[in-house]
Amino acid sequence: TLFVLLFSSSVVAEDISDFQIDGMSVGDSLLDYFSEEKILNGEVTIYPNSNKFFDINLLAKEYNKNSNYYSYSFSVKKDDNEYRIYNLRGIKFYENEISKCFEFKKSLINDLNIFSENIKREDYEFNYDKLADGKSMSYVTNYLFKSGNIRIYCNEWSKKTKKQFNQMDAFAFEIIMQEHLDWVSNKAY
């Protein structure tokens, strides 16, 4: 699990900026890790109801040849020339091996006994009921910090969703600033 989570300052972390994925953290400039050319050539995801933020998806091996992730997703603000990271996600695929994703998630969570007692944990299942046939699920563990959330989850996509949207079952480790969480919850959709 060391490849997933590194700490930049303390053993008992209380701020999401204390966490890193392959050496990157929220609040950093994406330019510290990728050239502007790579950033501009990354796959972009736009949200339907607001363009305040957008996502840039890049292959992990382009940054870190030893990464255990397949790709990263970064949420940045429109017109921010520094590309400050508000949401950072590492993605690892488990195509047709969702049980291995669950095992990996469970082992990672068992290793995360470093959080302060002030950090609330939520476990829940999220149904993508408006996507394709409505049978896709996300199995989420969410740690709530004052500054944002750390979310660890496995996505299990239905056959119809996989075919229609070219999705694969996957593990994700995500660090999200509160400003981005508020925007996604209230404006993005």
Image (cartoon, grey):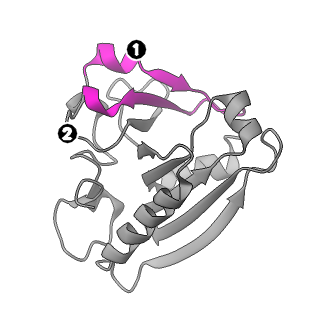
Nearest-to-viewer mark from 2 and 1:
2
- Answer left or right for 163 relative to 150: right
Q: Which mark is residue 119?
A: none
Label 1 environment density (alpha carbons within 10 Å; few <14, some 14–19, many ≥20): few
Q: Please report the bounds of the magenta region as a residue range.
A: 35-62
Q: Does the magenta stretch include residue 36?
A: yes
Hey, which quadrant is residue 80 in on the image? Answer: top left
Q: Can residue 147 be seen in this view?
A: no
Q: Is residue 65 visible?
A: yes
Q: Does the magenta stretch include residue 137?
A: no
Hey, which quadrant is residue 35 in on the image? Answer: top left
Q: Is residue 116 above or below residue 53?
A: below
Residue shown at 45% from the left, 66% from the top: 103
Q: Which quadrant does the N terminus fall into?
A: bottom left
Q: In this view, does 89 lie above or below 36?
A: below
- Answer left or right for 104 relative to 127: left
Q: Which mark is residue 66?
A: 2
- Tell me if label 2 and label 1 are in contact, CB under 8 Å: no
Inter-mark Cα distance, 2 to 1: 22 Å
- Answer left or right for 18 relative to 52: left
Q: In this view, does 98 lie above or below 116?
A: above
Please name whichever residue, 130 or 146, is drawn nearer the observer in this view of the structure: 130
Q: Which mark is residue 41?
A: 1
Amino acid type, residue under disc 1 in the picture? Asn
Residue shown at 68% from the left, 55% from the top: 137
Please name whichever residue, 132 or 104, is drawn nearer the observer in this view of the structure: 104
Q: Which quadrant does the C terminus fall into?
A: top right
Amino acid type, residue under disc 2 in the picture? Asn
Q: Element at badge 1? A: loop
Specify which label sits upstream in the sequence, 2 or 1. Answer: 1
Residue shown at 51% from the left, 47% from the top: 170
